[in-house]
Image (cartoon, grey):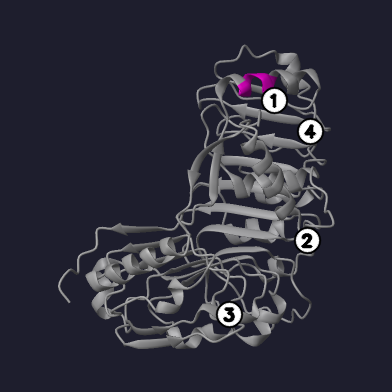
Amino acid sequence: MAAFPEDFEIDISRLIMLWVAEGFLKPCNKFKCLEDVGKVYLEDLVNRNLILVSKKGPDGKLVAVGIHDLLRKICITKAEEEGFLHHFSSKTNVCHDAIENPKRRLGAHCTETFQELHTQDSSLRSIFSERGLFSQLSLKFRRLRILNSPKVTWWNLPVVISTFVNLRYISVSLDDNMPCLNEFLASLSKLPNLETIITDVTYCEGLQVPNEILRMPKLRHLIMSHPRCLSDPSVIGIINTSDLRTLERVIGFFFTEDVIKILVNLKKLTVVVDHYGDNWDDLNLDNVFHLQNLEELRVSRDIKVLEIVDNDINRESEWTTIEDQFLRLKYFCSSLDYWVKWEVEKEHLPSLESLILVYVKLIDAISSGIGEIDSLQLIELQDCRGSLVNSARRIQEQQHENGNVAFQVNVVEYVYTND
C-alpha cells in the first residue's frame, strides 16, 4: 500500500495482479486460482478496517479501495525500516544516497518539474513511478518484476523491455511520441515470465495484437484501453489451452468452438463489435456457455451518435436461454436495444446476482423466471420503458416477501412511461 500515491483510488483487480506478480499469494485447497486467494485476503483487510472501500460496482461488488492517510504513513515508515520499499514524492526530502540505492522496490510519485532520477541499482525488483522520473529505462534493471508507470516517455522502452526476462507485470500509458504499439507488444511477447499486460495507448486505432502475444506461456491478463484486433488462435496454429483469465477490449472476436476450447480459462472478457463490418449473428454467442469459468462478459458495439442510422442493427431479435448454459453467471448487463422477447427460467441463471438493462425499449416485462432466482440482489434499469420498470418493482415485492430484504431495484432516468 505504501507504493501508491496519497489519496489514490486503487483498483482491486490490479492490486491483486500486483500481489500475484510479487509472489505474495499461494494456492490453497479451497482456492487454487491465485486471484481468488487475493480476494479473500483483501476482504479480510477490509473487514478489519485496514483498507477503506472507495467504490463498488453496480452488482455491489468491491471495485476500488483506499487507505487512511495516517495508516499510509505507517506503511511507508515500516517499508523503509524493513528495506521493503523506498518511497518518495515531491513533498519528500529526497536523500540522494537512498535514490542511488532504492532497495528492492521504488515508489516515486512526483510532479513533472521534479528532478530526474539516476538510479542504476541492478537489484531493483519493482518500479512504481510517474512521468519525468527517468529519461530512459536502464539495462541494469534485469531483475525487474513489476513496471507500473502511468505515463511513459522512455524512447528506448520497446528495445530494452525485451531484455527484462524476469518481468511479470507491466502497466504503462504510452504517448504519441513513442514507437508503434505493435513493436512494443512484439517486444513483450519475448518475455517468458510475463503474466499481466496493461496498455493505454490513444493512437493507432484498430491495430492487430501480435500473434506472438497469444503464444506467451504464462500470460494471464491482457487489458487494452482501446480496441485492438485479435487473431483467431486456431487459425494461427495455437492448439494448447491458454491460461488467459482476463481479455479486455478486443475487436474481431468470434465465439467459435475452436476459440472457446483454447480460451476456456477466461473469467473476464470484453469484446467490441466492429460497427462497420460485424454482424451480431456472426459472433456465435450461443457458444458462450462453453466458457465454464467466465464470470463477466461485456459485448458492446462502439457507435458514434451520428452513425446510428447507418448501422444494420435495427432487427428485432429473440433469445431463449436453456438449462445448464450459465450456471455460474453472476453479473449480466445488456444494451441490446432491439430485443422483443427474452425467455428465462430460474434454472437457466441459478447464480445470477445482478441484472443491468440499458435502453431496452421493446420488451414489455422482465421474465418472471428472473424473479424466482434466489441469489438475485439487484436489478438496474437505465433508460428503459415504464412497463419494464413496473415488472422490476413486482419482482422486488416478490423477493421481499420471500425474505430477500437486501434485494434492490435501481431506475436511472427511464424515458418510456406510456405503453
Query: How many angstroms separate mark 2 from mark 4 (CA)?
Result: 22 Å
Rendered residue at 82%/40% (across/down): 143
- CA gap between label 3 and label 4 equals 43 Å
Residue highlighted by disc 4? 124
Q: Is residue 249 above or below residue 199?
A: below
Between 207 and 130, the residue placed more toward the observer is 130
CA–CA distance in space, label 1 to label 2: 32 Å
Where 392 falls versus 89 (above or below)? below
| Mark seen at residue 288 | 3
Which residue carries the number 2 mark? Answer: 218
Report helix, strand or loop for mark 2. loop
The amino acid marked with disc number 2 is: Lys
Quarter holding the C terminus?
A: bottom left
**Residue 290 lies in what quarter of the image?**
bottom right
How many numbered marks are there?
Answer: 4
**Nearer the observer, 13 or 152:** 13
Q: Nearer the viewer, mark 2 or mark 4?
A: 2
What is the number of the mark on residue 96?
Answer: none
The three-letter amino acid code for the residue at tag 1 is His
Alpha carbon separation for disc pair 1 and 3: 50 Å
- Mark closer to the chain start, 4 or 1: 1
